Image: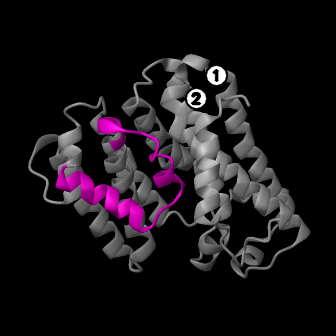
Amino acid sequence: MIPDIEHCRERLARRPNARYYSLLLLRGPRQEALFVLYALIDALEDVVRSCREPEVTLTTLSWWANEVEAAFDGEPTHPITRALRLVLADIPWERAFFDELVLAARLRATTMRCASSADLQQLTYRLGAVPALLTVRALGGMEREAQQAAQELGMGLALAELLLGVGADARAGRILVPVEQLQRHDVPAAQVLEGRWSEAFAALMRAQAERVRHHFRAADETVSPAMCEALRPLMARRTVTEALLAEAETLDYRLLDRRLELPPLRQLWLTWRGWRRKPGR
């Protein structure tokens, strides 16, 4: 494996999650391309996670935006963007999608409230649908239906990530459940920020989980068996996500004081099961 691409694989392996596990059954250039894509996403997420000063966060993300630009038209300096420049020769990825990845990180860092469901949908499109569309394109899923299914799966995965991370967001002073939904379920923002669980909060989270499942069902209605190969990594991640949502339901969505994680061996088993799973089942 080329050193810069190996750097991407090693970065993901150091902190393995469902994205990393979903690539282990791939082989060859397609796997390498997705190692690069997911390493870039991880690097952007790491900026959001680790930078405490908003000005530092935005400056660092601007640097990454310049690196992405150089990968498409210049001389990038970071191993991830150098690897991206290499794989772009063979993978039908468009520059606009990568600009959206950087914008998604900026929004994740700076958005403290979502006023409406439309705002949340726009955020989950950038956080989830864009990486999913890049994934399916790398695996040859160029049909409109395959990309539509990928978009639904990606938005469901991103929405689930926000749901499961509601406690960490609250501790950072952030609530990404739309204000209109908080009001509909009679959950004051102060209650979320203070980490106080209630039956009303559980009902709110249950409604969010149903929205995740709505996206997954929409993907099932779109896809055909011929498209399954391109969707396998996304289906693997969906299976892991569904297991996490089941754990959250068992806990009655007591998520404000914890972050749910599955043991690595269980994630591996669920990934393998999801890899073999056909949409709609």
Q: Mark 1: which secondary structure?
A: helix
Please determine whether, in this image, residue 205 is positioned above or below residue 167.
above
Query: How many numbered callouts?
Result: 2
> Going by the image, does 119 lie left or right of 191?
left
Identify the disc placed on residue 149.
2
Callout 2: few (<14), some (14-19), or many (20+) C-alpha neighbours within 10 Å?
A: many
> Going by the image, does 258 lie left or right of 104?
right
Identify the disc placed on residue 31.
none
Q: Position of residue 13 (x, y in %)?
A: 40, 62
The single residue placed furthest to the right in the displayed view is 199
Q: Position of residue 233 (x, y in %)?
A: 51, 40
Magenta run includes residue 22 = yes
Nearest to N terminus: mark 1 or mark 2: 2
- Colour style of the rendered protein structure: one colour
> Going by the image, does 253 lie left or right of 45?
right
**Which three-letter amino acid code belongs to the residue tagged 2?**
Ala
Quadrant in the picture for residue 139: top left
Residue 186 visible to an observer of this rendering: no
Quadrant in the picture for residue 179: bottom right
Give the main secondary structure of the magenta stretch: helix
Instruction: Report the span colored magenta.
Output: 2-31
Magenta run includes residue 5 = yes
- Residue at 65% x, 64% y is 262
Which residue position is annotated with label 1? 222
Depth check, front residue: 1 or 195: 1
Q: Position of residue 258 (x, y in %)?
A: 69, 76
- Residue at 33% x, 74% y is 55
Depth check, front residue: 20 or 124: 20
**Which three-letter amino acid code belongs to the residue tagged 1?**
Thr
- The C terminus sits in image quarter: top right
The answer to the question of whether label 1 and label 2 lie on touching residues, with beta carbons closer than 8 A, is yes
